[in-house]
Image (cartoon, rainbow, N blue to C red):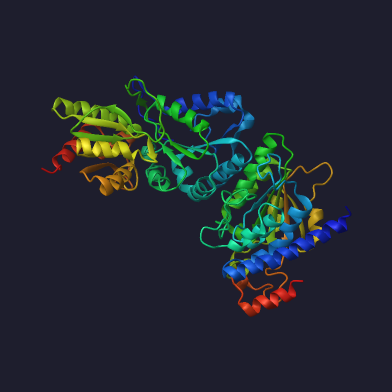
Amino acid sequence: MLKNDIADTIREKALWMRRRAFTMVHDAQLGHPGGDFSAIDIIATLYFGVMRYDAKKPDMPDRDRFIMSKGHATGALYTALCAAGYYPEDWLKTYMQPQSKLNGHPNRNYLPGVETNTGPLGHGLPVALGIAIAGKMTNSDYRTFVLTGDGELQEGSNWEAAMSAGNRKLGKFTLIVDRNRLQQGMGTEETNGLDPLDDKFRAFGWDVEVIDGHDVGALVSALSEPPGGRSKPLCIIANTIKGKGVSFMENKASWHHGVPNAEQYNIAMEELV
Amino acid sequence: MAAPAAKQEGFYDCRDAWARTIEDLAESDPRIVAVVNDSVGSSKLGGFQKKFPDRLINVGIAEQNMVGVSAGLANGGRIPFVSAASCFLTGRALEQVKADIAYAGFNVKLVGQSSGVAYGELGPTHHSIEDFAWLRPLSNITVVVPADSWETAEAVKWAAAHEGPVFIRLSRMPVPDLAVENRRFQPGKAELVRKGHDVTIVACGTMVHLAVKAAEELEAEGISARILNMATISPLDEAAISTAASETGAIVTVEEANIHGGLGGAVAEHTSANLPVPIERMGFPGFVPTGSVEWLFDHFGLTASGIARSARKAIGRKRG
């Protein structure tokens, strides 16, 4: 398959995920659509262009792992797992409903394809690190991917794990930072600044790539394993736009957990084509 | 760190049994790994490290990462035993224990070392007397408090074979092996250490052998005290507590822990809702003053005579 075909597939899946996630949020009147939309191109690229998995065998030992550390962005994760074939689309209609498998934050015991329960920030990177250590220990060739928010990096547990991953030279370990520069209330730099983020990770012993997190070609290239592999963990700082794809949501912190009314929903559906 | 109590003949540090057992288990099961926070020495894992250098993961002084990493290791098919001072393992990493281990339900074994007030003079920052109250409400985690070396070894073996999260709470206080015939470790079950009908003393961990001495003291006065070794704090053996309440009519609980929310709290929760009887809860009421382990035990009445005193009090509170 030509690379362009892969990119087209990813874009097509990402569009479907945005529309489906926004519908879920609209129907439930709950969710985190701003962060869903900044992360969707990254997650679509992982599931439809990079990762090795078999949705029929979610426990396959040598599957690549994806850990959604920003567990609140369930619109992005649940639509990706659905599109990847882990469960039928009907399940998405139950989002946040009483006793749904689709809780506000993912639970691996409810949903196939979820690797660990996340929600409290700063948990995904240490768990992903443990998965990567297990892989190295057993000479497995699976890769471990973890997506964190950027504001989330204010949690100290991330830096405990970053230090450990750097020291362990885990070449099959990839962190993607969804760098939309907005947290719940305001900008990351106004809250507790992260820049220069690339230098921080380099200082912790990581390779770093800074890319446009909505450029599917750049994502495929950064997320693909180079010939011969890597000798260090990789941090991809994906510059993104919170609310990407819907004019009135883009770069607005209020859409962190804002939910659309009927009119906003219709406008978004017209734009997401 | 604080020196353990002076060596007494026939008294053993349960950490030795833990270390021997985990080394043996690791020998036969390659999935078993140890995870520590610079706690190789205090966990007595020097031998494990020598035998299995690649299977000891030392994350450094970083408890949140330590617990998160263990969840990931379980995802990757390993059986991690996380061994660290109980105060830091449970206190510093409580949210990881809750979300990554209990709620996610990973097959991880947490081993809290030097728990209770084992660190004596080092003070409440290093004591772990709140751990029962923190872990008891977490669904899925079996909380086990071995009373001696034999039970420590059995609990570690059981934990390795059990699929699911376990917290094993160890001390560094040397304790004697309990004299119970035909012992079999049963998680979730109280062990009848001594029969009795006037009062039941429900004890765990380092307190069990003191309860036995208290019962001997009471026997000389004609008081018959039943002793239950409640090695599993959660889930609690409610049937054994109900039986004790109905047959003996009074209960003393004794634990090297805060009396709020621990063993005493668990027993009181059950009896108050089902079979209310007088209960005397022994342990620590909160942060303790400076003192050695021995001094602290004595100060708070966690001695054979102190337990006997509470037993008389509980009996005195029986109605009619």
For the question of whether residue B216 can be seen, the reply is yes
Residue farthest to the left?
B320
Q: Considering depth in this image, is A234 or B236 the residue closer to the camera?
A: B236
Residue at 52% from the left image edge and 31% from the top image edge: B160
Q: Quadrant of residue B55?
A: top right
Q: Position of residue B256 (x, y in %)?
A: 33, 38
Say above or below: B144 vs B17.
below
Say above or below: A19 vs A122.
below
Q: Quadrant of residue B36?
A: top right
How many numbered dots are placed on residues in this image?
0
Q: Quadrant of residue B46?
A: top right
Residue A20 placement, left or right of B285: right
Residue B229 placement, left or right of A183: left
Say above or below: B223 vs A62.
above
Q: Considering depth in this image, is B111 or B155 the residue closer to the camera?
A: B155
Q: Position of residue B311 (x, y in %)?
A: 19, 36
Q: Position of residue A80 (x, y in %)?
A: 69, 57
For the question of whether residue A248 can be seen, the reply is no
Residue A153 placement, left or right of B86: right
Q: Position of residue A17 (x, y in %)?
A: 71, 63
Q: Considering depth in this image, is B208 or B256 the residue closer to the camera?
A: B208
Say above or below: A169 vs B207.
below
Residue farthest to the right?
A2
Rendered-image quadrant of the C terminus of chain A = bottom right
Residue at 83% from the left image edge and 41% from the top image edge: A228
